[in-house]
Image: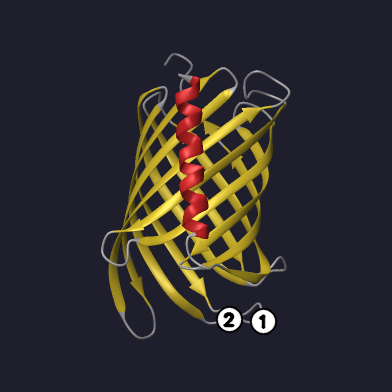
Amino acid sequence: MCSMKLKTFLIVLTIAYFSNTLYPQQQSSSIGNWGMIFNQTKLHNKWSLHNEVQFRSYTVNPNTEQLLLRVGVNFHPSKNVMLTAGYGWITNYKNDEGIIKNQLVDEQRLWQQLSLKDSYGRFFIEHRYRMEERWITNNLNSEYKNRIRYLLRLSIPINNKQISKNTIFFTAYDELFVNLTTQPFDRNRLYGALAFQFNDLTNLQIGYLAQTVSTTTKHYLQLALNYNLDFRQKSE
């Protein structure tokens, strides 16, 4: 079972590698950064809320590329399965030298998601399937797009057998984006991070992401805080 899961993970990484190398790639000269806060608020054993805020910069110094707000409602039919439906608001900005800039593209987005988690020994694996309905507007026109995304994540605790309180762990994922209404390949993201689990509800990840859009790959430093809340009744 473990070997099958690892083979699946390696296959996806191989696909990501060839998607980045099959065509001549241009490397962006600057390194960007993403700052992210994710929250899951548990209301019931079967229900929770999803909230996230992301600030994405063209460079390490603040030079706004994108602001992203996303909310959703989660349904947990079992411990390792989660269904989500939500809304996202995304604003993209022009790449210029100033921090203050004019809005370039505004996007309203609906999204639906299935997350499957599994583990074997010290290996924790997540499959995430997401559908997005996107309404994109700018100063000249507006358009509607559909997109699907598949993410495969592997997490490995370093100083404990489980990812629990005071655990250092490594996490990596590859995510492929496919358009349904335009040219199929949208982008690919390859990510790796070192993380610390403060308690059952909070961890901090410091990582690196390579994002390939068309034939251009750009590199980002990432800082992600997962800060969750649990409002469930003890009797549940």
- Badge 2 marks a residue whose secondary structure is loop
Left or right: where does residue 166 sit relative to residue 200?
right
Q: Is residue 231 visible?
A: no
Q: Are marks 1 and 2 in contact (CB under 8 Å)?
A: yes
Where in the figure is residue 50, as x and y percent of width and height?
A: 45, 42
Q: Examine the rendered structure and indicate whether residue 171 appears above or below residue 214.
A: above
Q: Which residue is mark 2?
A: 101
Between 30 and 15, the residue placed more toward the observer is 15
Quarter of the image for residue 48 reads: top left
Where in the figure is residue 67, as x and y percent of width and height?
A: 53, 64
State the quadrant of the N terminus: top left
Q: Is residue 228 visible?
A: yes
Q: Residue furthest bottom?
A: 140
Q: Residues within 10 Å of mark 1 (few under 14, many from 20)?
A: few
Residue at (35% x, 49% y) in the render: 86
Q: Residues within 10 Å of mark 2 (few under 14, many from 20)?
A: some
Q: CA distance from mark 1 to mark 2?
A: 7 Å
Where in the figure is residue 166, as x and y percent of width and height?
A: 72, 26
Q: Which residue is mark 1?
A: 98
Q: Examine the rendered structure and indicate whether residue 73 appears above or below residue 107.
A: above
- Tell me the kind of residue under disc 2: Lys
State the quadrant of the C terminus: top left
